[in-house]
Image (spheres, rainbow, N blue to C red):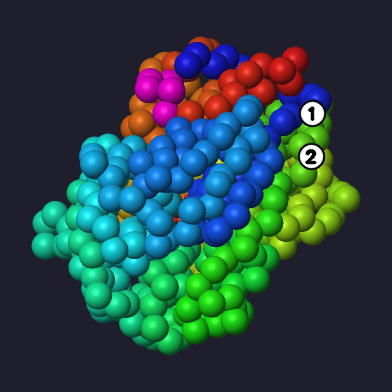
Amino acid sequence: MEISGVNSIRGEINIPGDKSISHRAAIISALASNQINIKNFLLSQDCINTLNILKKLGVKIEKNNSNVIIHGLGIQNFIEPDDILYVGNSGTTIRLLSGVLCAAKITAVLSGDKSINNRPMDRIIFPLKDMGANIYGRNNNSKAPIIILPSYKLKGRIFNIPISSAQVKSCIILAGLFAEGVTEIIQPEVSRDHTERLLEYFGVEIKYDGKNTKVFSLFESNLKGEIKGKNLYIPGDLSSATYFIVASCILPNSSIIMKNIGINPTRSKVLDILQLMGANIEIKNKKVINNELVADIESFTSNLKAIKVDKNLIPIIIDEIPALCVASVFADGETIIEGAEELRHKESDRINSIYNEFLKAGVDIKQKKDGLIIKGNKDFKPNGGIYESYKDHRIAMSLAILGLKSNNKIRILDSECIETSFPGFLFELKKVLN
Ligand code: S3P
């Protein structure tokens, strides 16, 4: 991808469906006993990998543009796949489906690309083993490929998770649905709660309150083991919208509007942080759609100032940090991000990726073990040249937004990785360029 400096962006941008909610909608609908129509499903590479795996497990799926129909099969009817289940680059796919497969009484092997097979999986393998699952991973049960064998009966447990993670929490919740008794997960900080909201919407007995989640056995509840799903609409992905919000703030004479974006409170802190930095953002037409808060977002050219990001918020802004770093390059003063070591375990080591490429751009940036310090100013002009995406979609999109402020051309390598979460990113960007 090649990006050159632009004067401004103006207009409406279509933000595709939320990635986290699309994965959950597909997986949880597959566990139901009825047909569920999902509108605005994100057909990005990560979510397609989830759909392909569900098909290999016997689930019938129909696709028509962004409308997806899942014919719920129920876990007891999943078939043993005759091949490995390939998750590609998707952490949500491997972690959530591991929880489900431990309860499915089949043998299955989950594997992914180079990045996935080097990301930590002990954080799901050990809790699942504690519940009685027959699950193993490479490298002393810490890495994928993961192999799951049938297990006799899972048991509900109480887990104190040391690092807040919605993927780990959701993995345990999904196994907990099919375990005996109650499964409780306690995390040090709040993480996104889409799994809880969707299960609740489908009538499952689940209690959640910030850092604590309690799920009750599906077999022991009045649902008697059967989930009855409802049709769904997936809100636009706020993480994807953030790139354009930042672009409109840092460019002169800019204004954009994006409709029906998910602003679930466990995701929307990035908007509060940008507003604290001085971003001119308006949130309109709030409504609740299938248990998720949705709104239209407008954003405009802004005078940004630096911020020290509250460490406690890191888990709920983790995916937006690369875009926030771009904003901080054009924010007067020193932006400090700490307590964010988790960034090193994403699709790439994002602290390192941001540090290396921003340094190339001429940004005044320091790297710490758990964060970044960026000194910004509104007149900064990034250097042209060739930039690495590290095959990480969020790094590629952040560099593209940074490039909009350059006086020279920037070339981003392996930018096709953007398909992981935002097919049509470049099309939408070109649409609003002036
Ligand atoms: C996600 C949770 C987060 C996030 C990821 C999607 C999810 O990961 O970074 O992009 O859908 O649950 P962690 O659970 O590892 O924090």
Residue drawn at point x = 65 percent, y = 35 percent: 67
Q: Nearer the viewer, residue 283 or 31?
A: 31
Residue 408 visible in this rendered orientation of the protein:
yes
The reply, left or right, for residue 286 in relation to residue 330 is right
Give the amino acid at mark 2: Lys
Depth-wise, is mark 1 or mark 2 nearer the camera?
A: 2
- Is 417 in the magenta? yes
- State whether residue 387 is above or below residue 61: above
The reply, left or right, for residue 86 in relation to residue 339 is left
Give the farthest residue toward the right.
Answer: 285
* Label 1 crowd (10 A; few <14 / some 14-19 / many >=20): some
Q: Which residue has dot 2 on it?
A: 259
Give the amino acid at mark 1: Glu
| Span of residues in magenta | 412-418
Q: How many marks?
A: 2
Q: Nearer the viewer, residue 216 or 33?
A: 33
The earlier-in-sequence mark between 1 and 2 is: 1
User: Residue 129 placed where, x, y %?
Assistant: 24, 73
Q: Nearer the viewer, residue 127 or 105?
A: 105
The quadrant holding residue 264 is bottom right
Label at residue 12: 1
- State whether residue 176 is above or below residue 415: below
